[in-house]
Amino acid sequence: MRMSWKNWIPWVVILIVVVFYPVVTDIYYTNIFVGFAIFALYAVTLNLLLGYNGLLSFGHAMFFGTGAYATALVLTHIPGFPLLPSILVGGLAAAVMALIVTPLLVRVSGTAFAMLTLAFGQLMFVLALKFREVTGGEDGVGGYPIPPLKIPGVASISMTDATNFYYFAVAVTALCLWLLWHYTKTPFGSLVVGVRDNAMRVDFLGLTVRHIRAINLIVSGTFAGIAGAMFALFQDLVSTVGVLDIFNSFSPIMMAYVGGVGSYFGPIIGSGILALLEDLTRQYTERVELVNGLVFILAVLYAPMGVVGLLDAAKTKWFSKSVEKANVERLS
Amino acid sequence: MSPTTAMYVAQAIHGLAYGMLLFLVSSGLTMIFGMMGILNIAHASFYMLAGYFCYTVINMTGNFWLSLLFAPVLAGITGVLVERFLLRKVHVRGHLAELLITVGIMLVILEGVKVFWGTESLMIRMPKGLDGLLTIAGMVYPVYRLFIIGLSFVILGIMALILFKTRLGKIVRAAVSDADMVSALGINTPLVFMLVFGIGTWLAGVAGVAAAPLLTVFPGMADQMGMDAFVVVVVGGFGSLLGAFVVALCLGELNAYGIQFIPRLAPVLMFAFMAIVLSFKPTGFFGERE
């Protein structure tokens, strides 16, 4: 099916907004957008497990944190390490981490999966906290040089400049999101959803459910690691409480849930909503998480499919002629 | 007695006191898990909440014993309200929604106490008569830790009596092993759930008040206790009180001696052990169900 020119309009609008955003806003809001973009990617990788595979991870920070630490350490210890490989190192480290834990994680599902990821997440947290020769313990690793983006023979773009880094981060995030979008649309992506809905039936088709879960987990972990690597470049500081803390496992869950776990774009929207909300509450109180927590509880209680689900329901109610039509386009 | 032996004994007492507190928290957690099938992420938050209630009650009345009476009850009432108005609403949608809502509750309680009581550590004075040291056979013991151990054993005894000698206890034990069947027999299981949730959070509350003078009250106080309680419930087996008791005491001692001999490995070992048990023996050592 070819997209008509009408389908391109929203993407063109988004592109224009993203390109001109740092021009019209100041550095503070530029950085907020970078944070939003990184966490949007992180939340999407979590949703690959939660929404697409029906597995709730309470330890997703172990992938994010591993990626962040790997990038920070490689930049600290190897002088002159280039920018793009440093991000790949983060993704690769998280992939290795995922490979190590996957054989145990695919054995379980449901609450047991949540508990086991919680255990691994906490294990990584205390390991990073205790082995301070490598990780710097509570203080973390910081102040490493952020390499410039070198295009051979053309230019060397400094990444310490907020606007430059903004364009770079948005480009990397968009590329990852584009890749993951196509990943979910492959036949394998449909299998992942199939395992969520009826694992036994997939098993009867002659496919190994554990392998499907394992591959999905590794893909999710790798991209979470890339998000962590971006975070390390963005903050120039990686500490246990910042990246491996259990609250860093909870926040993508909240983003995914508030935005809607039933849609690919839900976690991105959720990340945006929570970022806006955070900025708004910060003007009145320091207790940002209180508002986030309340919004999250309301979402779980009254909008199990998040904002996207609410919009879908509204669309069906007011605009759609037949009720079935709207239900077809759901996580196909 | 040599100073080394004295040190060992003192550490053992410390470990036992922490282990008993841990058991009070995890006994509620394991019962709730066994019965309702949900892992209550917010459980340790009630432990913390009771600590804060204790601080407020002491500020108002100046009496520790009153706070030991009222603060856990307030925490228990909060627990009942949470069960009735939040958990029950999402119960039909399955465990995932319940698990998620307990995460939200944990966040709200954590941030809520910061709004009401601030982020600083609040000191609570030990009650008179319990703040001293006791000398038995040439050894010195801090009285308050002995008090915690004694209090926990009394509560443990009462709980065991209720669970194993009354009709209510029989219903609760039956519901822990198969809630659907109990419901089919015509027993109002939602009411039993609410009651168990209330008692579970009350137990956590007792532990919170008992720990308050020892460890001070601060927003991070639920973190370690919560994680330790998860380990206890997982390793001991979901829904197994005996398992929780044994593992809680072991963990208490590991905490006390681990700090001395393997300060780095103690917490790592704990979570590694939890992961291994979950992967290879998901029923835990004393439990029967996943």
Image (cartoon, grey):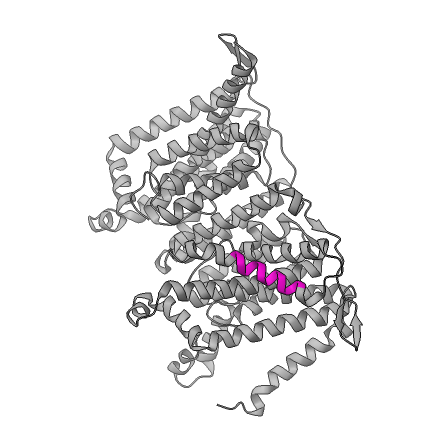
Q: Is residue A270 left or right of residue B93?
A: right
Q: Can residue B129 be spotted in the picture?
A: no
Q: Residue A84: in sight, yes or no?
A: yes
Residue A135 in the image, given as x and y percentages of width and height: 65, 47
Q: Is residue A89 magenta?
A: yes
Between A225 and A326, the one lying in front of the other is A225
Residue B11: image x %, image y %? 52, 23
- In the rendered structure, the answer to whether residue B200 lies left or right of residue A24 reads left
**Front residue of A123 and B233:** A123
Q: Where A90 falls versus B9 (above or below)? A: below
Which residue appears farthest toward the top when viewing the image? B137
Q: Residue at x 35, y 58 (%)?
A: B92
Report the magenta stretch's main SS: helix
The residue sitting at 44% across, 43% down in the picture is B274
Judge whether A107 appears above or below A8 on screen.
above
The magenta stretch spans which residues?
A: A86-97
User: Residue at image x 54%, y 37%?
Assistant: B265
Q: Which of the pair A16/A101 is nearer the observer? A: A101
Residue B212 lies in what quarter of the image?
Answer: top right
Return the x and y of residue A53 as percentages of the image width and height. 42, 65
Residue A284, magenta (yes or no): no
- Give residue B168's position: percent from left, percent from top: 27, 37
The residue located at (70%, 61%) in the rendering is A234
- Asked whether, in this view, residue A28 is left or right of residue B21, the answer is right
Q: How many marks?
A: 0
